[in-house]
Image: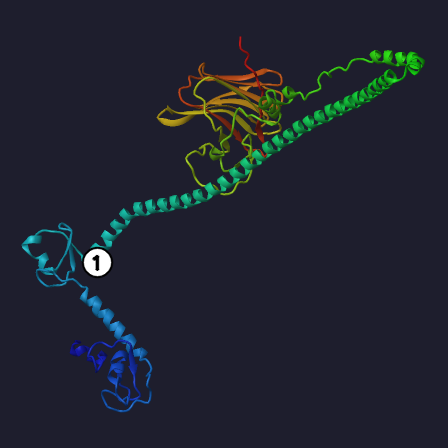
Amino acid sequence: MASRSDEDLCCPVCYEIFKNPVVLSCSHSFCKDCLNNWWRGKQTKDCPVCKRRSSKSDPPRNLALKNLCEAFLLAREQRGSETLCSLHSEKLRLFCLDHQQPVCVVCRDSRRHNNHRFKPIDEAAEDLKEELQKSLKPLMEKLKLFHEAKRNCDQTAEHIKVQARRTERQIKEQFKKLHQFLQEDEEARISALREEEEQKSEMMKEKMEALIREIAALSDTVRATEDELRAGDVSFLNNYKAAVERVQQGPLLEDPQLLSGALIDEAKHLGNLTYNIWNKMKEMVSYSPVVLDPNTADTTLVVSEDLTSVKSGVRPQLPKNLERTKFSCSVQGSEGFKSGTHSWDVEVGNNKDWELGMLGEDIQTDGRLQSGLWRILFSDGKFTAFSMPDHEKVLPVTKNLQKIRVHLDFDKGKLSFSDPDTNTHIHTFTHTFTDTVFPYIYTEDHQPLKILPVKVSVAVEKQC
């Protein structure tokens, strides 16, 4: 129940601070629920205080009184939140710097806090808030990093879907080409079979027609001769000479012969069929000795759909990923080398700003961790060889090259560059490679750099 000082803000029915007050025409106010309960079951709706009959069954809200009650309750709540000293029941107005706790003025003068340092509670709170704010700053920065990581994860998840759809489309396109080739080759082979069948069937038809004609002629001769043999003696003798001539002409006909190659040449159509299809298919198969990895490409580069060429261009916003190269305007090969010899040709064409080489393991130099990188560079019309750390050499190349051959002999520690058109050596790096190295391409030009395909051959291993 409210105290006397609160009586003006108390409902005359429940004697508590007004809740959702309404006012009657007689100017008395009540809690809305209290008034409705008072009126429930009564025939007349009168004022609980003055008994005057109310002209309204749904009296208006007393907004001014409602605001006063809410302000009073808020102030009382704030007053109640002031913590008193548990020892002296005094307000905590000071902060002991030695004990790091709020105290009252009596505590300050007590033996427990003798010779301690104090600050006003508001100053101490302000100072400690500043310290806490400083401590909070790294957490806020960490939280920002986590939010950025979450955004990157969302972007990565969406990019994965884009990659999957694009890759699926390209796989289907390649298989569609293969299916079309196989279908056309099947149709061509069946067409050749049908043509041979038609030719040999026509030949057999002509052969049978000739045999039928000869059979008919011989049958006529045999039948006529037999008729003469059955005739009377005088008639037989009169026709004997003609009959003999007719019979003697029969042996002049050649004996029927079997035709050579009359049957379908199944061996021609079926022999090594799958091998012949495969051998023919090599004409449409392209093999690149180096496949570029678009996940390593700088965001300023565009890699072709077949992953064999790269140029400068605008790409959609990409998520951050560990594989993306830390060298600007560059891309790596998808496969690294850690042994053996490897060679590939790059068509540089009219590209005015490019680098070709190998990106290798991290190496420690002067206390700094750097990646091994060996490459030749073409810029401003001149050729330069670079290797880390900071080794540079101008190359005596005067002509504009259209192609560059890169040759790696990992085991011998040699990386060579040459002009494949003239077989002219350009430069060779020597280094003891220890870890995997990856093909490396750099460009800031819109003219593409392209890995040239190598010739595909199908060979049969002969047994001795």
Residue 322 % position (x, y): 41, 35
Q: Is residue 126 above or below residue 322?
A: below
Q: Is residue 322 above or below residue 397?
A: below
Left or right position of 386 against 402: left
The residue to which callout 1 is attached is 122
Residue in front for this viewpoint, 386 or 144 = 144
Residue in front for this viewpoint, 264 or 459 = 264
Q: Residues within 10 Å of mark 1 (few under 14, many from 20)?
A: few
* Picture quadrant where residue 303 is located: top right
Residue drawn at (42%, 19%) of the image:
433
Residue drawn at (86%, 17%) of the image:
230
Q: Amino acid at mark 1?
A: Asp
Residue 377 % position (x, y): 53, 25
Q: Is residue 82 above or below residue 196?
A: below
Please state, as top left, top right, bottom left or bottom right, where the N terminus lies in the image. bottom left
Q: Secondary structure at mark 1?
A: helix
Residue in front for this viewpoint, 113 or 463 = 463
Residue 285 % position (x, y): 59, 27
Left or right position of 409 against 129: right
Left or right position of 371 against 290: left
* Picture quadrant where residue 422 is located: top right
Regarding residue 92, the answer to whether it shows in the image is yes
Q: Furthest residue to the top?
A: 464
